[in-house]
Image: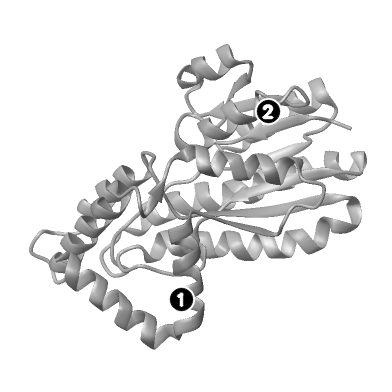
Amino acid sequence: MTTAVLITGTSSGIGRAAALSLVRNPEFTVYATARRPGTLTDLAEAGARTLALDVTDETSRAKVVATVEAEQGAVGVLINNAGYGEYGTVEETGLDGVRRQFETNVFGLARMTQLVLPGMREAGHGRIINVGSMGGRLVFPAGGYYHASKYAVEALTDALRFEVAPFGIKVSLIEPGLIRTGFGDTAAHTLAGSAAPSGPYAQLNTTAERQMAQSYSSKRLSAPAEAVAKVIEHAATATRPRARYVVTPAAKVLVHTRRLLGARAFDAYLRMQFRSAA
């Protein structure tokens, strides 16, 4: 049984925490990847093998998978973690940025999965762990395109889980809530640059940015990346991993609340939240 773990997007945040957690497991050989491998020095020192990977580039993707397979026979666990948030209203957000986000969050994830599956099928086992978001189960204003990418990951993961089960391959989806990483800063930056200060959605964008900052800084509402890494390790090692793992108590409450309230009541809840933030 191959024990090679390939993780995308390990330069920071959840990916880095997952690599540091898994590299301590003597059963695993961890391949930590990022567009700039120079950012992975500490992971290499911890025992991970580091590789350059741009999940939006076919040559880069194929080279990394081929390297792991040449050294290990097959990828045993693929952790599709690379992703970011392109924030802004549906009307004002530039679609070039949206396309770049989908190339990373959706198509990069899908292609990495396609590349490792032949080896996993031949080996008769494997794990694919997709890092989605609670944002694949509910939507906040000024985040529609990011949420759309995570809804897509939900659909792909559900289909994949059924399709590959006969080959001994297990698939899990990780749905973090607010995690204290650089994600919130990136999202706020794209939100701030998505529209003119005097545009029709100026007040909404300002409120959304303030709400985001308050939520990410709250230890009651958010959690460190290590909380997600712990769940990823469980999904990678459990005999019967779950289909979904919602991470953080606040995320579990929000997902459950959205399911119970329905669209009209949840919209009313959001209006109340955004009014209080303003």
Which of the two discs, 2 and 1, sits closer to the camera? Answer: 1
Q: Amino acid at mark 2?
A: Lys
Q: How many marks?
A: 2
The answer to whether residue 161 shows anywhere in this view is yes
Residue 168 on image: x %, y % = 88, 50
- Mark 2 or mark 1: which comes first in sequence? 2
Q: Residue at x 42, y 84 (%)?
A: 263
Q: Could you classify mark 2 by the number of other residues whose Cα lies within 10 Å: few (under 14), some (14-19), or many (20 or more)? A: some
Tell me if 163 is positioned left or right of 101 in this view.
right
Can the viewer see residue 85?
A: no
Residue sitting at 49 percent across and 69 percent down? 255
Amino acid identity at mark 1: Arg
Task: Name the residue tied to disc 1.
Answer: 258
196 vs 146, left or right, is left
Q: Quadrant of the C terminus?
A: bottom left
Classify 236 as above or below 110: above
- Disc 1, SS: helix
Q: Residue at x 53, y 65 (%)?
A: 151
Residue picked out by circle 2: 63
**Label 1 Cα crowd, 10 Å radius (few <14 / some 14-19 / many 20+):** some
